[in-house]
Image: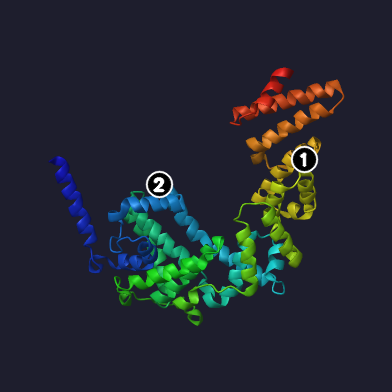
Amino acid sequence: MRRLLSFIVCLLVSVALFAQTWDQLSELEKYAVAFSSNLFEINQENHFDFSNKSNAEEGKQILKDSWGITDYQSLVDNFNTLEERGHSGAYDELLKLLDKHKKKSILEIAQAENLDVLDTSRLYYASTMKNVLGSHGIEAWDEGREITTLRWGIGAGYISYDEAVKLLEPVVERIKNDYVSWDDYMAHYIAGRCFYGLYSSNYKTLAEKAIKAAENTRKTIPYKEIKFTAKNADKKHVMTFDKSIYKPSKEALRWEEIQKLSTQEPGEKVLAELEKFEAEYPESKNITFWIHLDSLRRCAESKAVVGFIESYGAYLEALPAENEISINTKYVYMYALNDIGQPQQTLMVFDSLPDSMKTNVYFYYQYACAYYILSLQTPVESEKNIYEARAVAAFEQCEKIGYTLNDFIKKWIKSVK
């Protein structure tokens, strides 16, 4: 009986939540609902349940899966990241590069600035959309997501209603000042969704889905009641939904073919397509470097891998020490050097690593292998003993930090101890 009563109470609460209406919301809640309506509609949630209590578990799961948000701190950190930079910050940085290199092509700019494949796609986007979006760029995309995640966060129990409202109040006010209407705001938001969708070239599908969701919400939310001051709006660049979908140039579409290669399994097919593209657009070689190297290491001998890396010395030296491509390349380089019997060079690469990476087990394993190879190469017994001792110590340290040594190395360690 108690269980039945509990079920009935929960059911009544759920019905009450779904029965909430627009008129029951405060003025601030109405604006926040309007500005976060797109993701609520796409996820089939109750717009008027401001704190998302009726879909708390679904919202909690979305926060975890799509944002990595699992508690108060990660929620607030995410909010602050979107406020300080987000995708709109990345877009603005690309606009600066376009302004800095006015006479260069997109690929020439990307080469000069050591952009990766995705950022090159985004640079094409910025070049095409800057005269459509105007001064507020894709800020709406970040702002809409800020409000949405806070609403989900309340339902998930990560943040109180009062604190969430305090955070979203200035965001709501900024949107009211920066756009002339809900359509203008939402079109900018959808354009930002396109920018996000560049990572997998599915921006058109994402935008069309967002437009459909926006149109659907008109049946539920009375947007005519949402008033904008527009005092900071870029009135020369008022947007409509038809303008929000990114229409790439012929060159950008050609580049998308290369970006799609970056998501495929590296190998001979990808390598052949890359080499063809690089011959056609030599200014792309730095940008496609990692895709090329990743494919090369899968289907070529280590000697070819070493030669390829060394031919890009100037490019690699220009990368920040902790850049992901720089770090990954050094690992591939160390592995290939050991494979072709150049352990001294491997140790030099290890020494060039940032201190934070020298304790990484995979790099440390190559370091151990280098001393093992040296112990085999040297004819001098005293040197051999030193190299063996260093290799053993390094291999044992690898085991301590979680690396599983193969049986051959284990037997070798026993034989020299």
Camera-nearest residue between 206 and 192: 206
- Report the quarter where the C terminus lies: top right
Q: Which mark is residue 113?
A: none
Find residue 116 and report its image quarter.
bottom right
Callout 1: helix, strand or loop? helix
User: For the image shown, how many numbered marks are present on the structure?
Assistant: 2
Q: Which residue is mark 2?
A: 71
Q: Are marks 2 and 1 in contact (CB under 8 Å)?
A: no
Residue 227 percent coordinates (x, y):
35, 76
- Report the quarter where the N terminus lies: top left
Which residue of the protein is positioned furthest toward the bottom in this rendering? 236
Relative to 321, is 60 on the left or the right? left
Q: Which residue is mark 1?
A: 337
Q: Can residue 139 be seen? A: no
Residue 49 percent coordinates (x, y):
28, 60
Residue at 66% x, 60% y: name it. Answer: 115
Distance, label 2 to label 1, CA atoms, is 44 Å
